[in-house]
Amino acid sequence: MTEETHGMQPDNAPNETTNETATSNDATLGNRIAAVLIDGILAAVVFPIPVIGMIVGTAYLLTRDALPFLDGQSIGKKAMKLRAVDATSGQPLTNQWGPSIVRNIVLFIPLFFIVELIVLANNKDGQRLGDQWAKTRVVTC
């Protein structure tokens, strides 16, 4: 090991002493809520535009974490300095359309956001159900 890295592990590397995954860079519940509220407001602004507004707003909400020009960050996540990443590799979801849609489509189920909030608040890995199903996590950047 070099002197600079002695005793340090990469983010989300297994901790050798506890055999658990380090989660020091996971996004906080408050930051995640703020980011989704920002994204929701943005979508609500375009929704009233006849036909195209609903299409654009829905497409944004489903694919916001995969948009190539946002580097794995929705506009809300960018504002809150968060990023959606693959839970295994830690790579941003940029151009990863499947995981982005899987993690976000559940938010279209009426009142399911309440379940997601409860799961997120109580999950030791900082993942809501959409994150677990898509094998993603949200981290600070």
Image (tube, rainbow, N blue to C red):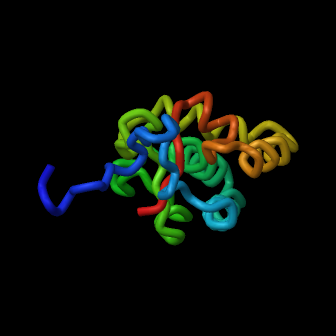
Image height of 53 relative to 109, above or below: below
Residue lying at the far left of the rendered structure: 2
Residue lying at the far bottom of the rendered structure: 79
Picture quadrant where residue 36 is located: bottom right
Taking 123 as reference, is 23 left or right? left
Taking 111 as reference, is 89 left or right? left
Q: Quadrant of the C terminus?
A: bottom left
Residue lying at the far front of the rendered structure: 17
Taking 37 as reference, is 97 left or right? left
Which residue sits at x=38%, y=46%? 92
Q: Position of residue 72 (x, y in %)?
A: 41, 50
Q: Position of residue 7 (x, y in %)?
A: 29, 55
Q: Nearer the viewer, residue 53 or 81?
A: 81
Q: Position of residue 96 (x, y in %)?
A: 40, 35
Q: Nearer the viewer, residue 52 or 42?
A: 42
Which residue sits at x=35%, y=42%? 91
Marks counted in the figure total 0
Which residue sits at x=38%, y=51%? 11
Image height of 50 relative to 134, above or below: below
Picture quadrant where residue 53 is located: bottom right
Which residue sits at x=66%, y=44%? 124
Q: Nearer the viewer, residue 97 or 4?
A: 4
